[in-house]
C-alpha cells in the first residue's frame, strides 16, 4: 500500500468549462501545470475551449508549443535565449526600460507584452512615462527587424485580499494606464491583468478593453478566496493512503518523532498510515484532520513515511485515508492557514506518490 495522487479527468475538464464561462481565458500552466502535468492539463484546457497559455519557464513554453501547435503562448518571465523564443513563436514580457535598451535588437521579430509593475514590484514599467518612452522609441525605429509590441499586461497581487484597499488601488492604477494609452490611439492585440481572484471578483467575466483573463488556480480546482461558494469550483484531485495497522496506546505514552504526541487517555487507538512529509504532506497540514470511511479523524503526529491518526473502533487496517478530495479540499486548508493552494500542490512528492488519471 502506497499513497496515491489521482485526478478525476472528467471532473477536471468539467471544472475548466465552468471556470471558463465562455470567456477568453489564458490558462496559467507554470510549474508543470501546478503539478497536474503539463501535457494532461493543456490537452484538457484545449478541449474546454482555451487556446492561450502562459508560463514562467521557456522550457515549458516550448513543450506547450509541441502539444498545441496553434496556441498562443505567453512567457511571463524575461529570458535571454531569444533564438528559442523566436523559433517557437512565443510571446514574452517586456519587464523594464533597461531590458528594452539592452536587448531591443535581440528582440527582433519577437512579440512582447509591455508589463506594468503595479503594487507587486516584481517586474514591469513603473509609470506611464516609461510606457511612453518605449512606445515612442519603437515608433521611431523604422527597421523591419524589430520587436513586435503585441500586448499589455499586469498582475493583481492583492485581488484575494478583502480587508485592505490594495486591490482597488492596483486596479485603478492599471486601468488609468490602460485607458490613457487606448485614448491616445495605441492598440494591442492582447491585454490581460486578471488572475483567478480578480476574475471571480469581477463576476467571472473579462474586464472591459481586455482580451483575456489570466487564470491559474481556479482551473485546478481551488477557490482563490473563501467568500466564493464551493459549488463554483470543483476539485478533481484526491490524495489518499491506507491504514496499515491500528495500535492501542495508553496515557503518558509518546508517539512519533521527538515526543510529537503525548497520549492523554488509556486505550487510545492510533491508526498508522503510510504517508508522511517525505511524500510532501506539509507539517501545517498535519495539524488538521483526514477522512476515513466518511468521518473526520485528527492527525496526531507526522513522520517521514507515516502519520498517526487518533481513531475509534470503526477504523481498521487497509481502510482508505483521504487527505484531499472535493469533500476535504485544498482550498479549505489554505483558508485555515496551512499554506497557499499552490504551496500545498507544489509540496507533494510525485516521485514517491503513485500518480493516476482516472
Image: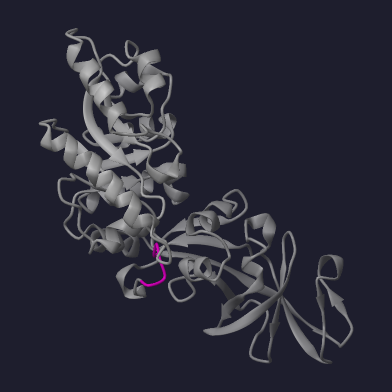
Q: Which residue is nearer to you in this view: 72 or 209?
A: 209
Q: Position of residue 175 (x, y in %)?
A: 23, 46
**Quarter of the rendering occupied by the N terminus:** bottom right
Display coloring: one colour
Q: Position of residue 121 (x, y in %)?
A: 45, 40
- Asked if 320 appears above or below 69 in the picture, the reply is below
Q: Is residue 108 left or right of residue 323?
A: left
Quarter of image, res 273: bottom right
Please give the name of the residue rendered at 59% of the width and 76% of the height, measured from the top-left corner.
290
Q: Is residue 119 left or right of residue 181?
A: right
Residue 45 on the magenta span: no
Q: Is residue 227 left or right of residue 243?
A: left
Q: Residue pushed farthest right?
A: 252
Q: Position of residue 35 (x, y in %)?
A: 48, 49
Residue 196 shows in this picture: no
Q: Which residue is nearer to you in this view: 358 or 120?
A: 120
Boundaries of the magenta span: 223-227
Please give the name of the residue rendered at 23% of the width and 36% of the height, measured from the top-left corner.
71
Please give the name of the residue rendered at 40% of the width and 60% of the height, measured from the top-left corner.
160
Q: Which residue is nearer to you in this view: 358 or 270?
A: 270
Residue 92 shows in this picture: yes
Residue 226 on the magenta span: yes
Magenta portion: prevailing SS class: loop
Q: Which residue is nearer to you in this view: 190 or 184?
A: 184
Q: Residue pushed farthest top?
A: 143
Please give the name of the residue rendered at 73% of the width and 77% of the height, measured from the top-left corner.
245
Q: Position of residue 188 (x, y in %)?
A: 17, 33
Amino acid at each position: 500500500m502506497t499513497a496515491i495522487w489521482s485526478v478525476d479527468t472528467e471532473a477536471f475538464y468539467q471544472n475548466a468549462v465552468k471556470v471558463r464561462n465562455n470567456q477568453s481565458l489564458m490558462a496559467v500552466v507554470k510549474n508543470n501545470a501546478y503539478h497536474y502535468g503539463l501535457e494532461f492539463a493543456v490537452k484538457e484546457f484545449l478541449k474546454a475551449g482555451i487556446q492561450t497559455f502562459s508560463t514562467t519557464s521557456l522550457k515549458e513554453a516550448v513543450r506547450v508549443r509541441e502539444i498545441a501547435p496553434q496556441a498562443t503562448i505567453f512567457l511571463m518571465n524575461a529570458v535571454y535565449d531569444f533564438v528559442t523564443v523566436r523559433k517557437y513563436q512565443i510571446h514574452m514580457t517586456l519587464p523594464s526600460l533597461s531590458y528594452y535598451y539592452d536587448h531591443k535588437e535581440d528582440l527582433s521579430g519577437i512579440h512582447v507584452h509591455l508589463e506594468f509593475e503595479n503594487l507587486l514590484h516584481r517586474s514591469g514599467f513603473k509609470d506611464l512615462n516609461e510606457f511612453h518612452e518605449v512606445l515612442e522609441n519603437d515608433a521611431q525605429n523604422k527597421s523591419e527587424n524589430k520587436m513586435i509590441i503585441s500586448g499589455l499586461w499586469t498582475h493583481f497581487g492583492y485581488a484575494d485580499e478583502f480587508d485592505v484597499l490594495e486591490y482597488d488601488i492596483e486596479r485603478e492604477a492599471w486601468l488609468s494606464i490602460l485607458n490613457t494609452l487606448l485614448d491616445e490611439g495605441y492598440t494591442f492585440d492582447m491585454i490581460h491583468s486578471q488572475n483567478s481572484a480578480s476574475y471571480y471578483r469581477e463576476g467571472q467575466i473579462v474586464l472591459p478593453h481586455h482580451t483575456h483573463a489570466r487564470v491559474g488556480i481556479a482551473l485546478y480546482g481551488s477557490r482563490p478566496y473563501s467568500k466564493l461558494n464551493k459549488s463554483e469550483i470543483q476539485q478533481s484531485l484526491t490524495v489518499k493512503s491506507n491504514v496499515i495497522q491500528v495500535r492501542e496506546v495508553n496515557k503518558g505514552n509518546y508517539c512519533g518523532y521527538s515526543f510529537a504526541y503525548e497520549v492523554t487517555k488509556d486505550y487510545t487507538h492510533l491508526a498508522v498510515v503510510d504517508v508522511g512529509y517525505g511524500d510532501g504532506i506539509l507539517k501545517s497540514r498535519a495539524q488538521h484532520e483526514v477522512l476515513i470511511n466518511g468521518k473526520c479523524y485528527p492527525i496526531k503526529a507526522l513522520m517521514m513515511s507515516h502519520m498517526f491518526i487518533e481513531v475509534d473502533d470503526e477504523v481498521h487496517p487497509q481502510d482508505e485515508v483521504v487527505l484531499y478530495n472535493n469533500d476535504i479540499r485544498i482550498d479549505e486548508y489554505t483558508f485555515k492557514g496551512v499554506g497557499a493552494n499552490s504551496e500545498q500542490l507544489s509540496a507533494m512528492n510525485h516521485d514517491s506518490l503513485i500518480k493516476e488519471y482516472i
